[in-house]
Amino acid sequence: MASPATLPQPALDMTKLNSWSLSQIHGIETEPITWPDEFSSNSRGSISLTAEAIHLTHLGELRLVNIISPKICIINLFFYPQDASELPVYAMEYVRFGPKAVVGVVDMKWLPEHRTPTWIANTMTAVSLEVGDLPRGQEMPKWYEECRSGNDFFLRPENEDDLDRSVMCHQLTWLAFLKKLSHGATRVTNNEPEICSKLVSQYKDHHRINSPGLPFLNRTFGKPWTDTFLSEFYFK
């Protein structure tokens, strides 16, 4: 695993986290997924949203969103495994309002209820040891508890050092995840691709319905745009 010393110094600006994440993809064939302009970029006043989707050949898809303004920073990334790939969902989100970081989340969720690979828990444990103790959210939203892996980072940074190290949680986990992807994915057999597809769809629907950002998106970009963006593009 990469060590904190190998990561960008000084600590990475949170607004650049998705760009950094994409820049670390090497040796994996990728292809952008085209969305209509109105759903890949939108702005209202000082608030701008950019979104993109990328196909990782034989592996799955990435979905990324940045919502930036002088007072708001919301960074979100999902990897959804291809139907026949034995890979977890990867989920990352960081939210900051003004000078205060609200939450940082990093998770690798194995969706089938059996044969959870040991490398997932081992990776998260190794990352935790690298970054040291961080303030964890004592009370998690019920909807989040229902979809978390149990090995996840659900963080409530209290200061700039906490925020820098919480961002490092994603960086280190992401590099380990990409290393796994670069080795290819085991192919599932029999009827499991159909089961995997159903589980991924359920995971997407759960986030689309319960996203805590819904009121903000509805208020900022309007409910019709938000409903279409989430259901037809980001969580499709």
Image (cartoon, grey):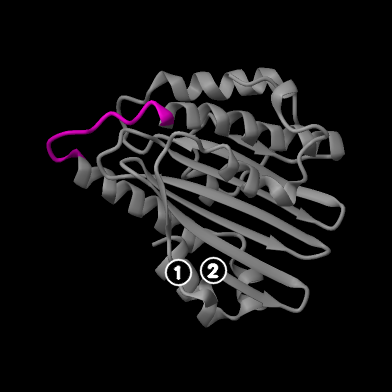
Q: Are marks 2 and 1 in contact (CB under 8 Å)?
A: yes
Q: Residue at x 35, y 40 (%)?
A: 59
Type of amino acid under label 2? Ser
**Residue 36 makes an appearance in the image:** yes
Reply yes or no: does residue 187 show up in magenta: yes
**Residue 132 makes an appearance in the image:** no
Q: Position of residue 176 (x, y in %)?
A: 53, 26
Q: Residue furthest left?
A: 190
Q: Residue at x 42, y 37 (%)?
A: 28
- Would you name the residue on which mark 1 appears? 35
Depth check, front residue: 55 or 153 = 55
Q: Which residues are magenta?
A: 182-192
Q: Position of residue 129 (x, y in %)?
A: 67, 17
Q: Is residue 122 depicted above or below 216 in this figure?
A: above
Q: Position of residue 80 (x, y in %)?
A: 40, 46
Apparent side of residue 54 relative to residue 16 in the rendered image (left or right): left
Reply yes or no: does residue 135 show up in magenta: no
Depth check, front residue: 148 or 192 = 192
Q: Which mark is residue 40?
A: 2
- CA distance separating discs 2 and 1: 6 Å
Corner quadrant of residue 118: top left
Which quarter of the rendered picture does the N terminus lie within?
Answer: top right
Q: Is residue 171 depicted above or below 196 in this figure?
A: above
Q: Position of residue 31 (x, y in %)?
A: 41, 52
